[in-house]
Image: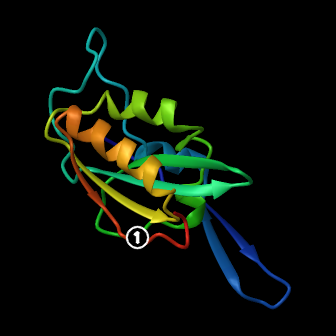
Amino acid sequence: MRIALVFAVFISATGSVQVLATDHNLRSLVPPAPPAGEIRHSKRFFKGVELNSWRERDQWRFSLLLGTNRAKSDVEVKAPAATVKDVDELKQRLAQLAPGEFVSWQGPEMPPETIRKDIEAFCRSLGLKVLTSRRTNGAS
């Protein structure tokens, strides 16, 4: 498999350099849909998936990314290709994962306890292994 890495480099007025991955590169981090004719993946991803959550105005947003050995930037976590608009859409995506899949929930912000518990219970009902960061950033 060939992966193209495309970056945009910005130099701010202060002279600092920022490197941002493009959306093309981010698509390789988004778990693909199950194979044609299947509802769920039959095999787990090598390093599981990372679930991220954050508040955008008065709504909770989520993203599911393939697990890697590095921390993701906010640009990667909140990229449109990876963003899930609400809990219902998140559940649809989680339901496509293979039984036994490892889901690491990392933030950067955690939703209120009622939403967290609902998503965790849904993951368990699918046979997913969810590890939730206990950082709450004041959400309750």
Query: How far from the left and from the top, in percent, is residue 14?
Result: 81, 91
Q: Nearer the viewer, residue 69 or 86?
A: 86
Q: Quadrant of residue 12?
A: bottom right
The residue lying at 17 percent from left, 39 percent from top is 44
Q: Is residue 50 left or right of residue 56?
A: left
Quickly name the residue at label 1. 71
Which is nearer the eye, 71 or 57?
57
Out of 75 and 119, give the one closest to the viewer.
119
Quarter of the image with the N terminus is top left
Displayed quadrant of residue 41: top left
Residue extending furthest bottom? 14
Q: Is residue 135 visible?
A: yes
Residue at point 60% right, 49% down? 60
Q: Amino acid at mark 1?
A: Ala
132 vs 87, left or right, is left
> Is residue 135 found left or right of 87 in the rendered image?
left
Q: Position of residue 109 (x, y in %)?
A: 53, 65
Q: Observer-nearest residue: 68 or 21?
A: 68
